[in-house]
């Protein structure tokens, strides 16, 4: 059942809007604010939302550099995750109806209006703001899918969570502890207190030292049962080395630090582990039953209060390049949001 928000009266829909346009494949510094982008019209099976907040993700950075597989070609309207109010429905759509608060993924989220597939528009949970709902269709299902259906975490096992201070990492720490796991997290030193406050049992410095050696020391040389690997680069090798031989699983859900190579030689002679790739978009398309189970479990965790709403770090829409630069440099903690207008009282903007 979709819960409609009654406090906002319907607004007329303009023909043009403010949006962030990516103009090259040289990075997010070439993202420009334009004021005359056409407001999209919802097609069959789609809804149009007035964007309250847009989520900022590493995939936005990959697309801006042209490294995202089959990514858009410039110029394009940037962003893909947003939350806001439904203002119009396309042909054949019976819900969510205008006035409903939803979150979802599509194209052109860094804008004042965005089209979403109606079937995939997730209602904002009662008591949550649209800004707090960012991550419900990207970060949280990614973390849960990595832990449970793919990672097979069980009570008493140990999980290594890289980038634990980020939006996906924070969710993974919270859920792993709920499922009875021991959590070893990695983060830069300035973020350790944040990660420990989430319940992590140990936090290692992601910027220095031998991560694999640190994990082996904490586990008495045994290694961990599960690694959630999103850091990429040299950290990927450390995750392989930190996993238990034969039974250890490494779920690869990002490559923020760049690509890393692994060969069949490595898997036979050096790292006898299970390597599992995770892309939440592919999971939705190729294994919809698993995704439905993940979303059902997420709903139960939210209802039980295990996953509480968190405020994002918010930036004005025009400051999108700044937000992406700070995310790329690992200077941020938690979820980041872009605000297209004065729609978020009480949230401190950066």
Image (cartoon, rainbow, N blue to C red):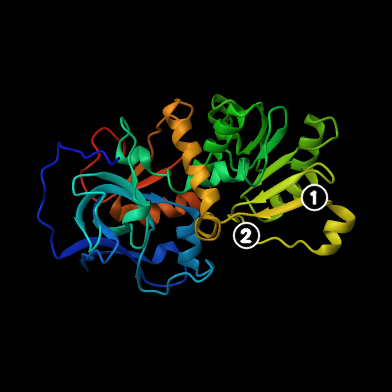
Residue 326: x and y in percent read 46, 49
Identify residue for label 1: 273
Q: Position of residue 17 (x, y in %)?
A: 19, 62
**In-front residue for pair 126/2:** 2
Q: CA distance from mark 2 to mark 1?
A: 21 Å
In the depicted structure, whether residue 346 falls above or below residue 131: above
Describe the element under mark 1 as helix, strand or loop.
loop
Query: Where does residue 300 sit, x and y in percent of width and height?
Result: 46, 32
Q: Quadrant of the N terminus?
A: top left
In the shown orientation, is residue 185 left or right of residue 21? right
Residue 198's tag is: none
Q: Residue at x 61, y 50 (%)?
A: 230
Badge number at residue 258: 2
Image location (x, y in percent) of residue 2: 28, 41
* 30 sits left or right of 186 in the view: left
Which quadrant is the C terminus positioned in?
A: top left
Please state which of residues 306 and 3 is positioned toward the viewer in this rendering: 3
Residue 316 is left or right of residue 79, and the answer is left
First in sequence: mark 2 or mark 1?
A: 2
Q: How crowded is the residue under tag 1: few (<14 C-alpha within 10 Å), some, or many (20+)?
A: many
Q: Judge whether residue 53 can be spotted in this image.
A: no
Residue 106 located left or right of residue 158: left
Near-viewer residue (2 or 5): 2
Question: Who's the residue at 68% across and 38% down the image?
Answer: 160
Report if residue 240 is visible in the image. Answer: yes
Numbered disc 2: secondary structure = loop
Q: Which of the two marks, 2 or 1, is nearer to us in this view?
A: 1
| Residue ranking furthest to the right | 269
Give the total number of marks visible in the rendering: 2
Please tell me whether residue 125 is drawn above or below residue 78 in the rendered image: above
Q: Are marks 2 and 1 in contact (CB under 8 Å)?
A: no
Q: Nearer the viewer, residue 132 or 137?
A: 137
């Amino acid at each position: 059942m979709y819960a409609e928000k009654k406090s906002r009266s319907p607004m007329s829909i303009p023909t043009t809007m403010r949006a962030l346009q990516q103009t090259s494949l040289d990075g997010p510094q070439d993202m420009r604010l334009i004021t005359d982008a056409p407001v999209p019209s919802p097609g069959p099976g789609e809804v149009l939302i007035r964007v309250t907040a847009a989520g900022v993700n590493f995939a936005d950075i990959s697309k801006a550099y042209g490294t995202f597989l089959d990514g858009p070609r410039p110029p394009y309207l940037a962003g893909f995750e947003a939350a806001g109010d439904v203002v119009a429905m396309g042909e054949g759509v019976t819900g969510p109806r205008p006035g409903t608060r939803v979150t979802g993924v599509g194209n052109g989220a860094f804008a004042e209006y965005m089209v979403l597939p109606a079937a995939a528009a997730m209602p904002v949970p009662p008591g949550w703001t649209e800004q707090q709902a960012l991550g419900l269709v990207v970060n949280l299902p990614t973390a849960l899918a990595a832990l449970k259906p793919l990672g097979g975490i069980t009570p008493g096992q140990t999980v290594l969570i890289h980038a634990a201070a980020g939006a996906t990492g924070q969710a993974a720490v919270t859920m792993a502890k709920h499922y009875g796991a021991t959590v070893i997290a990695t983060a830069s030193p300035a973020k350790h207190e944040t990660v420990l406050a989430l319940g992590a049992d140990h936090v290692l410095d992601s910027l220095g030292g031998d991560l694999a050696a640190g994990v082996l020391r904490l586990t008495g040389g045994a290694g961990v049962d599960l690694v959630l690997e999103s850091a990429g680069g040299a950290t990927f090798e450390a995750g392989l080395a930190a996993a238990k031989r034969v039974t250890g699983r490494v779920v690869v859900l990002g490559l923020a630090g760049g690509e890393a190579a692994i060969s069949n030689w490595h898997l036979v002679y050096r790292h006898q582990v299970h390597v599992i790739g995770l892309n939440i978009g592919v999971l939705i398309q190729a294994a919809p039953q698993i995704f439905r189970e993940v979303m059902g479990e997420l709903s139960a965790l939210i209802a039980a209060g295990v996953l509480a709403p968190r405020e994002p770090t918010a930036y004005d829409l025009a400051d999108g390049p700044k937000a992406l630069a700070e995310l790329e440099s690992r200077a941020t903690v938690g979820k980041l949001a872009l605000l297209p207008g004065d729609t978020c009282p009480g949230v401190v903007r950066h």
